[in-house]
Each structure stands twice: as C-alpha cells, then as structure tokens.
Amino acid sequence: MDPEHTGTQRYRSGLVLGKFLPPHCGHQFLIDFARRCVEELTVLVCSIASEPIAGSLRFAWMRELCPDCRVIHIDDELPQQPGEHPDFWRLWHEAIRRRVATGPDCVFASEDYGRPLADLLGAAFMPVDIAREQVPVSGSMIRADPPAHWSYLPPCVRPYYVRRVCLFGPESTGKSTLARELARQYGTVHVAEYARGLLDPKGGRCERGDIPLIARGQLAAENALARHANRVLFCDTDVLTTTIWSDLLFGDCPRWIVDAAAAQRYDLTLLLDVDVPWVDDRQRFLPHSRADFLARCRQALRSSGRRYVTIRGNWEQRLVQARSAVDQMLAGGDDQHPPALAHE
C-alpha cells in the first residue's frame, strides 16, 4: 500500500468482481474486508448463460448481502479465461468501463486474477485470503457437495440448496407429529400447517375467502423457514393440499394457487395412509371420507409428477419408514429436480 493510504486513511473507491457461484462466507469476508478499506465499494456480479445458477439470482443474492454497496450485474457473454480469446483483457475492460466509467482506486480479490485486473483498471491491488486459510471454502466445493459445506452458505442462499420434504395426505394421519419429530431428529426446522392457526379462532370453519390466505401463508412460512433449515426442511402440508381442499369444499380453486402449487419444488413427499384411528378436533371435516381424500391426494401427486413414498402402520412404523425414505433421499446427492417416484 502506498504511504498516503496507510494508518486510518481509506481509499475512496474499491471494486470486487466475481461470479459468486454461489455466494458464500468467503465472499462475505472479502466484501467485509473491502468495505473497511474504502469509502465506496462496487461489487460486479459476472455471469454467462451456460452457468449452473442463473446470473439474475446471484445478482439478487449479492444485492441482499451488500446493501451498502453498489452492486452491478455484468451478463455479457465474455470469455472466461485469457486463453479463450486474444482480446480477453480488452473485452473485459470495455465491459467494466460501460458500468464503471472511472476508478476504482483499489481492487480486492481472493483469486490471482485480481492483480492483472487492478493493473488493467489503473488501481492498487489488495489480495484477501488467496490461500483460503481464513475461510476455507470455494464455490466449486459448495456446488460439489452443498450439505458438507452448509455452514458456509449465507441464509439467503440456503433455500436454493435445501432438500424439502413434504408431509402430505388426509386428516388425522400424523402429518404434524411426524414433521415435528423428523425435524428434531435431523436437527432442523419444520413448517407448520398455516391453516390451523388461521382457522382455530373461527372454530375450524373454512370459508372460500380463507383459501387464498391459507395458500399465501403456507408459501410465506415455507420460504421464510427455508433460510433457517439445516440441509433439509420438513413441511407439514403444502399448497397442493390447499388446491385439493378448495376443490372439495368449494368446487374450484383460484388459478394462481394452482400455478403456485405447480411451481413448488419438493425432493420427497411422504404420503400418509389412513390406516390409523381418527382423532377428532375442531378443524377436521371428513371422518368417513379419508379413503376418498387419500385417492385425491395420490392422483394430485401423480398428475404433478411429484416424487412420493406412502407411509403406513402405527406411529413407530411410520417414523421408521419416513426416516428410511429421507435417508435414501439425502444419500442420493444434490439433484435439484429428482425424477418422479411413486412407491406404494
């Protein structure tokens, strides 16, 4: 560092450039380091269409992680290595200058490209943990095995990698109990059935206007708790169940809820059978129609191409079967879109 920038004096402007594929705690350390050295920090999120995580999503993640920085997305189809194009550095210089017309005073990087990039922009270079001793992780390590590096993922990134398990099926089959117990045993969180808290004050009575509230509440709870999950998230029911209830009680379902149900991703669905005694409470409607509701559930899962396993037997048997299915799913690797599987 030049003498004029020693002591407490900071650079006026700095720049961090990366793919953030995905963002992790090493990136957070890099950016926190740079923030403390400059008055203004620009973060360039660079992506090309062929990369495994959409650039727009990485840009959104970085905007959330760097609220006090200027975050810019560069999605030009640029060469990724100097050997790919004879004008590699000129192309990158032009792309950067279209977004950052002047400066920066300093470039911060945890990779070797930082020094030639700084030279290209006429800036000083400050390496940050290039040996990866402070935060021993990389994007490629996370992509290869997200669960093994879970603690390095910021909360906003975790929903992308979390494995979601849905407890699905008719009333009084143990979904809530099983969701809570599975979450406890796997050291994670579970999403409770939103409808229960909404309808309890009304004595369990469900009206047509409640259906959109139930759907929005279930989606909001799941998306919020996915940030706090430890590798796997257990969901006590889902919006597909809401569509079944809406059709059954009112003869139809708002289109946006049907579309939202189709968009939700679950790595595994546990369909609970009705071979257990009925337990009445203020929110249960169909003591004599559980078999029909189970058939509706099975058809809905098949129509949506959802991967599911049917869980039967007493409480102990259900827990053993559920754990076996979850363990098998977790051992199957990081498949973001597993094939449909129905196991009866």
Image (tube, rainbow, N blue to C red):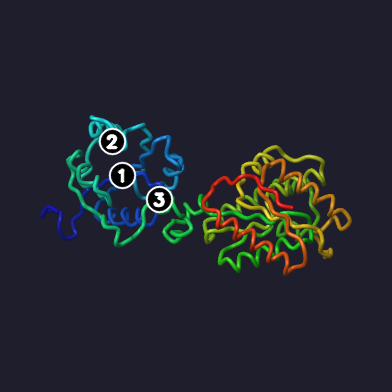
Q: Which residue is mark 1?
A: 17
Question: Which badge, 1 or 2, comes first in the chain's sequence?
Answer: 1
Relative to 123, is 168 on the left or the right?
Answer: right
| Image point (20%, 43%), residue name | 118
Q: Secondary structure at mark 2?
A: helix
- Per the image, label 1 sits on a secondary structure element best described as strand
User: Alpha-carbon distance for marks 1 and 3?
Assistant: 12 Å
Q: Position of residue 244 (x, y in %)?
A: 76, 46
**Residue at x-position 57% and y-position 45%:** 337
Q: Is the residue under label 2 in contact with that under label 1 (CB below 8 Å)?
A: yes
Residue under label 3: 23
Residue sitting nearer the eye, 324 or 123: 324
Q: Residue furthest left?
A: 3
What residue is shown with label 2? Answer: 96
Percent x, y of residue 167: 69, 56
Q: Mark number for residue 134?
A: none
Q: Nearer the viewer, residue 225 or 269?
A: 269
Residue 1, percent across and down?
14, 54
